[in-house]
Image: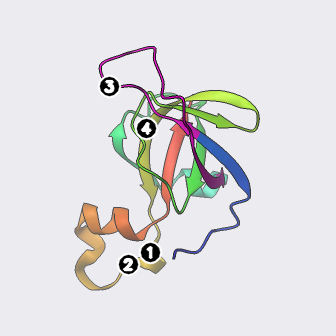
Amino acid sequence: MLATNNEKDIIELYKRVENSPYEFEDKCVFFKGRPASPVEKKTYRVQTGVNSNQDSTYLLASNCPEIKPKDKIKFRGKFWTVESIGYYYDNSRIINSGAFNEDYLAKRCPKGITIV
Protein backbone atom coordinates (compact mmCIF):
# COMPACT_ATOMS: atom_id res chain seq x y z
CA MET A 1 0.00 0.00 0.00
CA LEU A 2 1.22 3.49 -0.86
CA ALA A 3 1.88 6.19 1.69
CA THR A 4 -1.11 8.50 1.97
CA ASN A 5 0.78 11.84 1.90
CA ASN A 6 -1.50 13.31 4.59
CA GLU A 7 -4.64 12.83 2.47
CA LYS A 8 -7.63 13.54 4.66
CA ASP A 9 -10.34 14.81 2.29
CA ILE A 10 -12.87 12.27 1.07
CA ILE A 11 -13.54 12.64 -2.65
CA GLU A 12 -16.55 11.19 -4.47
CA LEU A 13 -16.12 10.17 -8.12
CA TYR A 14 -19.10 10.02 -10.47
CA LYS A 15 -18.15 8.35 -13.75
CA ARG A 16 -19.68 9.54 -16.99
CA VAL A 17 -21.86 7.02 -18.85
CA GLU A 18 -20.19 5.96 -22.12
CA ASN A 19 -21.42 7.81 -25.24
CA SER A 20 -23.50 10.21 -23.16
CA PRO A 21 -22.23 13.74 -22.51
CA TYR A 22 -24.71 14.51 -19.71
CA GLU A 23 -25.46 11.25 -17.87
CA PHE A 24 -23.46 9.97 -14.92
CA GLU A 25 -23.57 6.67 -13.04
CA ASP A 26 -25.73 6.60 -9.90
CA LYS A 27 -23.09 4.90 -7.76
CA CYS A 28 -20.04 6.86 -6.73
CA VAL A 29 -16.52 5.74 -5.80
CA PHE A 30 -14.95 7.15 -2.63
CA PHE A 31 -11.23 7.79 -2.26
CA LYS A 32 -8.99 10.07 -0.22
CA GLY A 33 -6.98 12.98 -1.46
CA ARG A 34 -5.93 16.54 -0.72
CA PRO A 35 -5.17 19.78 -2.55
CA ALA A 36 -1.64 19.96 -3.93
CA SER A 37 0.80 22.49 -2.55
CA PRO A 38 2.23 25.24 -4.80
CA VAL A 39 5.53 23.33 -4.98
CA GLU A 40 3.76 20.11 -5.98
CA LYS A 41 1.80 21.92 -8.70
CA LYS A 42 5.09 22.66 -10.47
CA THR A 43 5.94 18.94 -10.62
CA TYR A 44 2.57 17.86 -12.10
CA ARG A 45 2.79 16.00 -15.42
CA VAL A 46 -0.34 15.41 -17.52
CA GLN A 47 -1.04 11.90 -18.88
CA THR A 48 -4.66 12.20 -20.07
CA GLY A 49 -6.63 15.33 -20.86
CA VAL A 50 -5.45 18.91 -21.10
CA ASN A 51 -4.17 21.25 -18.45
CA SER A 52 -4.93 24.61 -19.99
CA ASN A 53 -6.55 26.60 -17.20
CA GLN A 54 -4.26 28.32 -14.71
CA ASP A 55 -7.14 28.51 -12.22
CA SER A 56 -7.55 24.73 -12.05
CA THR A 57 -7.55 23.08 -8.65
CA TYR A 58 -4.88 20.40 -8.30
CA LEU A 59 -5.58 17.31 -6.20
CA LEU A 60 -3.14 14.66 -5.01
CA ALA A 61 -4.39 11.11 -4.38
CA SER A 62 -2.10 8.13 -3.78
CA ASN A 63 -4.79 5.46 -4.18
CA CYS A 64 -6.68 6.99 -7.07
CA PRO A 65 -9.32 4.92 -8.92
CA GLU A 66 -9.57 4.90 -12.71
CA ILE A 67 -10.69 8.38 -13.75
CA LYS A 68 -11.30 9.90 -17.17
CA PRO A 69 -11.55 13.54 -18.22
CA LYS A 70 -15.08 14.99 -17.95
CA ASP A 71 -15.99 12.72 -15.02
CA LYS A 72 -17.50 14.57 -12.04
CA ILE A 73 -15.92 14.82 -8.61
CA LYS A 74 -17.50 16.01 -5.39
CA PHE A 75 -14.78 17.69 -3.37
CA ARG A 76 -15.45 19.72 -0.20
CA GLY A 77 -19.17 19.91 -0.91
CA LYS A 78 -18.90 21.17 -4.48
CA PHE A 79 -19.13 19.34 -7.81
CA TRP A 80 -16.16 19.71 -10.17
CA THR A 81 -15.32 18.44 -13.67
CA VAL A 82 -12.10 16.49 -14.18
CA GLU A 83 -9.85 18.30 -16.62
CA SER A 84 -6.75 16.10 -16.61
CA ILE A 85 -5.19 13.09 -14.94
CA GLY A 86 -1.48 12.73 -14.32
CA TYR A 87 1.15 12.28 -11.65
CA TYR A 88 3.46 14.35 -9.46
CA TYR A 89 7.09 13.76 -10.43
CA ASP A 90 9.03 12.74 -7.33
CA ASN A 91 12.76 12.00 -7.58
CA SER A 92 12.78 10.01 -4.34
CA ARG A 93 10.60 7.25 -5.84
CA ILE A 94 12.74 6.57 -8.91
CA ILE A 95 14.86 3.41 -8.98
CA ASN A 96 17.56 2.77 -11.63
CA SER A 97 16.59 3.42 -15.25
CA GLY A 98 12.92 4.06 -14.58
CA ALA A 99 13.57 7.81 -14.70
CA PHE A 100 12.88 7.93 -18.44
CA ASN A 101 9.95 5.49 -18.61
CA GLU A 102 6.57 7.28 -18.48
CA ASP A 103 4.63 4.17 -17.36
CA TYR A 104 7.11 3.44 -14.59
CA LEU A 105 6.91 7.00 -13.28
CA ALA A 106 3.10 6.97 -13.36
CA LYS A 107 3.02 3.81 -11.21
CA ARG A 108 5.59 5.00 -8.68
CA CYS A 109 4.66 8.67 -8.22
CA PRO A 110 1.57 10.07 -6.49
CA LYS A 111 -1.45 10.47 -8.79
CA GLY A 112 -2.84 13.85 -9.63
CA ILE A 113 -6.10 15.28 -10.91
CA THR A 114 -6.89 18.80 -12.07
CA ILE A 115 -10.48 19.91 -11.67
CA VAL A 116 -12.41 22.94 -12.91
Q: Which residue is disc 3 drawn over?
A: 18
Magenta-span inclusion, residue 22:
yes
Give the spatial CA distance, label 1 vs label 3: 37 Å
Q: How was the colour assigned to the protein in this rendering?
A: rainbow
Q: Mark 2 belongs to which amino acid?
A: Ile
Q: Earlier in the sequence, mark 1 or mark 3?
A: 3
The type of residue carrying mark 3 is Glu
* Residue depicted at 40% across the width and 71% down the height: 108
| Three-letter amino acid code at the position of disc 1 | Asn
The amino acid type of the residue labelled 4 equals Ser
Q: Nearer the viewer, mark 4 or mark 1?
A: 4
Closer to the camera: disc 1 or disc 3?
3
Of mark 4 and mark 1, the one earlier in the sequence is 4
Which element type, helix, strand or loop, lies under badge 4? strand
Q: Nearer the viewer, residue 94 or 12?
A: 12
Report the residue marked by disc 4.
Answer: 84
Q: Picture quarter containing residue 8?
A: bottom right
| Residue on which the image places disc 2 | 94
Q: Is residue 61 left or right of residue 47?
A: right
Labels 2 and 4 touching (C-beta < 8 A): no
- Are the residues flagged by discs 1 and 2 in contact, CB closer than 8 Å? yes
- Main SS of the magenta part reads loop
Label 1 element class: helix
Say which element carries label 3: loop
Report the residue at 69% width, 50% height from top: 10
* Spot occupied by residue 33 in the image (x, y as percentages of width and height): 64, 54
Is residue 17 on the magenta stretch? yes
Q: Nearer the viewer, mark 2 or mark 4?
A: 4
Q: Earlier in the sequence, mark 3 or mark 2?
A: 3
Alpha carbon distance from label 4 to label 1: 22 Å
Q: From mark 1 to mark 2, how far is it between C-alphas?
A: 6 Å
Magenta span: 13-35
